[in-house]
Image (cartoon, helix red, strand yellow):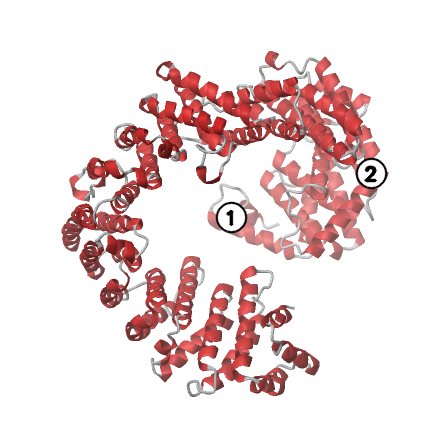
């Protein structure tokens, strides 16, 4: 071997050595006989370095996996002997091999097994057993090989074949079935016997091997005859392990796999019941005496498995009409509920989480029963109380810096919510009554109650909204009992003073609940002032916690929007109180606003909504809107001047961000308007035109162009909706500035603006489009032709997105009935544009762009393809568009398994149909006599194709083309 290259296998080796080692590995993989050197090194223990041993196994693994069939009988025999020799050596070595080497060796054994067991090595397991006997190191390898074999045959997590076709997967599945069938016939009983011997021999003196063996039993039990394991001697030994601390977790998992095995429902019930009796008599059901939470988590999973297995049996028995057995199974299920409840209420969330499946399915059974017994009602109530208790935060929860434990609790809460929803389906009245009781008791004494109990009481009220669903949030009408209960609780919530509780979780839950039940304030509007004050003072937008302030800004916006009819009396007061929160924070004064710029967006939107939806006169609305926007405009002018003079890049960035925020805030206020009509009615057109004139000079600023352009572009999008044609005079100069020195991303974001203008104003903007059409295209082509690094993925993606935007622009122009914009660009330019569309349809493997290109071609054929179309276009149709319709689908990259490609093909069919529609028999004649024969298409196929094309129903041709 190349000793120098082997040095690079050490993880601490430098990059050059490592590179050399990798290259050497590739070299050995392709070499005809290099694997023999590795086999010899392993059989004779030539190397002591672990990384070299691992490397040798990797070379052998590659040989067995990919090149085994190329080997001679003698060479195949050599690999078998190498592995057996290596295995024998394991029992004599002074030190065991490292775990990663043993696992790799087991994988190579397993690969050899699946290749040779059915043909050349039927005694595979017997040969291994005869070598290892009961030697602990040998047994360790034997068990690892068994797990590796199971992973090859059964483990569904392993993707066995890269880019595996359905055929290859089917072949592999058949091979695996045949291997398992043969093993069941020839060796499984012997293997099971060996497992029993290992468990008996090592259970008291080698816990590691015993646990490994239990893992093997658990893995194999899913596909071997269950009676080999589910019998007295095996179950007794497993139950014995349940009381041995180092073995019981693995024994638990093994029993879980036994219970999980698919079988006849009556037999399953008997198996689970016999297991339960033995576990109970062994004292394992006394949860309160157990303090090992890791074991209890596994035990909870086992009880969950038993419960769900019984429920699955009950469902099958009911379906089969076997009522007697179903009743027996239901009794067995009911008998486990007390244990389930003990685990559900356990203070450790993992233990509780593991039993939720059983609990959920049990409630599903109760939902199906016509009437509940007293015991079942008591069970429902007990589950409800358990869920309420378990929803509670613990003392350790870190609200300011949420980590992994907190994330796990949030997920656990989601599981509990599903249980609560299921409880509501079983007994909505009971759920409502229970929540009401907990809620009222807690809120009566909230000042002296711990935060987690107050939070959960409000949380339960919040959760009722989804647990007891109604349409459009109408919780306060309809069912009187429910409406009254919810109304009472909401009244208590907003009058109890609990919004002043000094804990962020309670504060947030208060605001979330108030917003979720906003319809309550339509019924009792007298509470609106108190809730508004909570939003506006230190409890909400001025809270000490940034997290609370941020969430409240969003919720406040929702609250105001949903109650706009009831907000009128408070508008000016609210606007005055939020004024300081809307301060634009310039970078130089060091003053930090209470809210981030993202949060301020919600406040500006809220202010806009308050003004626009008010009952004030248009004059008053105009004054208020001007008061809101003038400070932004004034600040903008000052900051823009400062930016022009700023030298330091960090300062430039800070100023540009601040300018961008100002434009963003102004944009956001306009969200209250749906169209020009509402802007006019409020008398606000003028103030937005002023904003436009204030913001547009930023486009000519040579510094921080990307940030400034992005903000102004967004504002223009909004103004096209709000001011409509009043914006048009500003568009040409804005466009000219935005096309200067632009990059792919700038253009990509600019084109949607032009598309919006084109689609909205159509012929009104035709002169402008004709004027800026070629400057825009030149800017696009310039960026697309820029050389890029071969491996620069992001540059390639940017170009692809720009290409899509370019074609989307052409689609908008042609689709808005303005093909003259293209036609008037002069023959040379028109030709260049047409060729880019053909190129987009055929050459680029991007189905989204291809689809757009065929839509454009169809439209152009429809507009220009008739007898009176532009000179030379008919020629272009036959020379370029018709071939494109065939060349695109014939490309190897045209993958009909991809949904976008199917859509592209559909548009390609439409293009051909449109050509036929416009050119008539001439088109068919060209296809039959010239084009298709030039592609060597058989005459009968040509005939068939032309017939399909002439069908009046377009679907017929689309389907034909797909096939």
Image coordinates for residue 536, horizontal then vertical, percent: 26, 32
Image coordinates for residue 617, horizontal then vertical, percent: 20, 48
- The residue shown at (39%, 29%) is 509
- Residue 502 visible, this angle: no
Question: Which labelled disc corresponds to residue 375?
Answer: none
- Residue 808 visible, this angle: yes
Residue occupied by mark 1: 18
Q: In this view, does 792 lie above or below 619?
A: below
- The residue shown at (22%, 41%) is 582
Camera-side residue: 795 or 905? 905
Count of numbered badges drawn on the protein: 2
Tell me the SS state at disc 2.
Answer: helix
- The residue shown at (85%, 39%) is 186
> Which picture quadrant has residue 96?
top right
Camera-side residue: 633 or 251? 633
Tell me the SS state at disc 1.
Answer: helix
Camera-side residue: 682 or 215? 682
> Which picture quadrant has residue 819?
bottom left
Question: Which labelled disc corresponds to residue 184?
Answer: 2
Q: Is residue 613 above or below residue 535?
A: below
Q: Is residue 124 above or below residue 923?
A: above
């Amino acid at each position: 071997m190349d000793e120098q290259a082997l040095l690079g296998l050490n993880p601490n080796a430098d990059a050059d050595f490592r590179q050399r080692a990798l290259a050497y590995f590739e070299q050995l993989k392709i070499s005809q006989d290099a694997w023999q050197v590795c086999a010899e090194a392993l059989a004779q223990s030539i190397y002591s370095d672990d990384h070299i041993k691992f490397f040798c196994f990797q070379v052998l693994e590659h040989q067995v996996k990919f090149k085994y069939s190329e080997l001679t009988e003698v060479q195949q025999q050599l690999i078998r002997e190498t592995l057996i020799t290596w295995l024998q050596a394991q029992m004599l070595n002074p030190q065991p091999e490292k775990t990663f080497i043993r696992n790799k060796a087991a994988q190579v054994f397993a690969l050899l097994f699946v290749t040779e067991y059915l043909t050349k090595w039927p005694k595979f397991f017997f040969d291994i057993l005869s070598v290892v006997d009961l030697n602990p190191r040998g047994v360790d390898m034997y068990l690892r090989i068994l797990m590796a074999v199971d992973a090859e045959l059964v483990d569904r997590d392993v993707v066995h074949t890269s880019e595996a076709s359905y055929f290859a997967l089917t072949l592999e599945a058949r091979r695996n079935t045949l291997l398992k069938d043969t093993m069941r016939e020839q060796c499984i009983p012997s293997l099971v016997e060996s497992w029993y011997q290992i468990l008996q021999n090592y259970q008291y003196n080698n816990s590691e091997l015993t646990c490994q063996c239990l893992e093997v039993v658990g893995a194999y039990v899913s596909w071997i005859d269950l009676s080999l394991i589910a019998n007295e001697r095996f179950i007794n030994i497993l139950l014995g392990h349940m009381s041995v601390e180092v073995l019981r977790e693995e024994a638990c998992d093994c029993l879980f796999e036994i219970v999980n095995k698919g079988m006849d429902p009556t037999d399953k019930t008997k198996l689970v019941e016999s297991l339960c009796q033995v576990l109970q008599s062994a004292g394992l059901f006394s949860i309160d005496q157990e303090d090992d939470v890791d074991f209890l988590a596994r035990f909870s999973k086992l009880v969950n498995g038993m419960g769900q297995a019984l429920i699955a049996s009950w469902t099958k028995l009911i379906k089969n009409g076997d009522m007697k057995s179903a009743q027996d199974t239901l009794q067995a299920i009911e008998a486990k509920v007390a244990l389930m409840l003990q685990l559900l209420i356990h203070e450790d969330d993992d233990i509780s989480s593991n039993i939720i499946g059983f609990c959920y399915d049990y409630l599903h059974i109760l939902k199906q029963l016509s009437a509940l017994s007293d015991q079942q009602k008591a069970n429902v109530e007990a589950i409800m109380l358990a869920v309420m208790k378990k929803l509670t935060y613990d003392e350790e929860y870190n609200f300011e810096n949420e980590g992994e434990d907190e994330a796990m609790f949030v997920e656990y809460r989601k599981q509990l919510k599903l249980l609560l929803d299921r409880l509501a389906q079983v007994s909505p009245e009971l759920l409502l009554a229970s929540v009401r009781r907990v809620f009222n008791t807690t809120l009566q004494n909230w000042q002296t109650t711990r935060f987690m109990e107050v939070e959960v009481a409000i949380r339960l009220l919040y959760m009722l909204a989804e647990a007891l669903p109604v349409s459009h949030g109408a919780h306060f009408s309809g069912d009187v009992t429910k409406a009254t209960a919810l109304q009472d609780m909401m009244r208590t919530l907003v009058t109890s003073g609990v919004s002043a509780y000094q804990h962020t979780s309670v504060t947030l839950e208060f605001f979330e609940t108030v917003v979720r039940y906003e319809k309550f304030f339509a019924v009792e509007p007298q509470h609106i002032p108190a809730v508004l004050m909570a939003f506006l003072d230190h409890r909400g937008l001025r809270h000490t916690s940034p997290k609370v302030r941020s969430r409240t800004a969003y919720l406040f916006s929702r609250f105001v929007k949903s109650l706009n009819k009831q907000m009128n009396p408070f508008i000016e007061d609210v606007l005055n109180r939020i004024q300081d929160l809307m301060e634009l924070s310039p970078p130089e004064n060091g003053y930090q606003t209470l809210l981030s710029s993202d949060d301020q967006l919600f406040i500006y939107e809220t202010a806009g909504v308050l003004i626009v939806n008010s009952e004030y006169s248009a004059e008053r609305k105009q004054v208020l809107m001007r008061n809101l926007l003038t400070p932004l405009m004034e600040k903008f002018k000052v900051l823009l001047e400062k930016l022009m003079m700023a030298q330091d890049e960090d300062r430039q960035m800070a100023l540009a961000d601040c300018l961008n925020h100002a434009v963003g805030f102004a944009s956001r206020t306009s969200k209250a308007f749906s169209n020009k009509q509402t802007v006019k009615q409020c008398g606000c057109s003028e103030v937005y035109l002023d904003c436009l004139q204030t913001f547009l000079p930023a486009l000519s600023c040579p510094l921080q162009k990307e940030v400034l352009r992005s903000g102004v572009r967004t504002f223009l999008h909004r103004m096209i909706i709000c001011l409509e044609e009043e914006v048009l005079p500003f568009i040409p100069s804005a466009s000219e500035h935005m096309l200067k020195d632009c990059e792919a991303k700038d253009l990509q974001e600019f084109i949607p603006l032009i598309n919006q203008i084109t689609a909205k104003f159509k012929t009104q903007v035709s002169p402008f489009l004709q004027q800026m059409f070629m400057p825009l295209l030149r800017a696009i082509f310039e960026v697309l032709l820029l050389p890029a690094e071969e491996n620069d993925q992001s540059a390639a993606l940017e170009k692809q997105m720009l290409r899509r935007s370019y074609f989307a622009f052409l689609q908008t122009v042609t689709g808005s009935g303005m093909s003259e914009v293209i036609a008037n660009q002069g023959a040379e330019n028109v030709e260049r544009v047409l060729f880019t569309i053909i190129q987009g349809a055929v050459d680029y493997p991007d189905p989204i762009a291809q689809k757009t290109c065929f839509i454009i071609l169809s439209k152009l054929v429809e507009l220009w393809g008739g007898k009176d179309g532009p000179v030379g276009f008919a020629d272009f149709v036959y020379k370029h568009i018709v071939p494109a319709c065939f060349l695109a689908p014939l490309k190897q990259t045209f993958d009909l398994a991809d949904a976008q490609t199917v859509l592209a093909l559909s548009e390609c069919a439409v293009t051909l149909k449109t050509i036929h529609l416009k050119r008539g028999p001439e088109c068919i004649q060209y296809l039959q006599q010239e084009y298709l024969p030039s592609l060597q298409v058989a005459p009968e196929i040509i005939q068939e194709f032309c017939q399909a094309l002439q069908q009046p129903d377009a679907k017929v041709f689309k389907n034909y083309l797909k096939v």
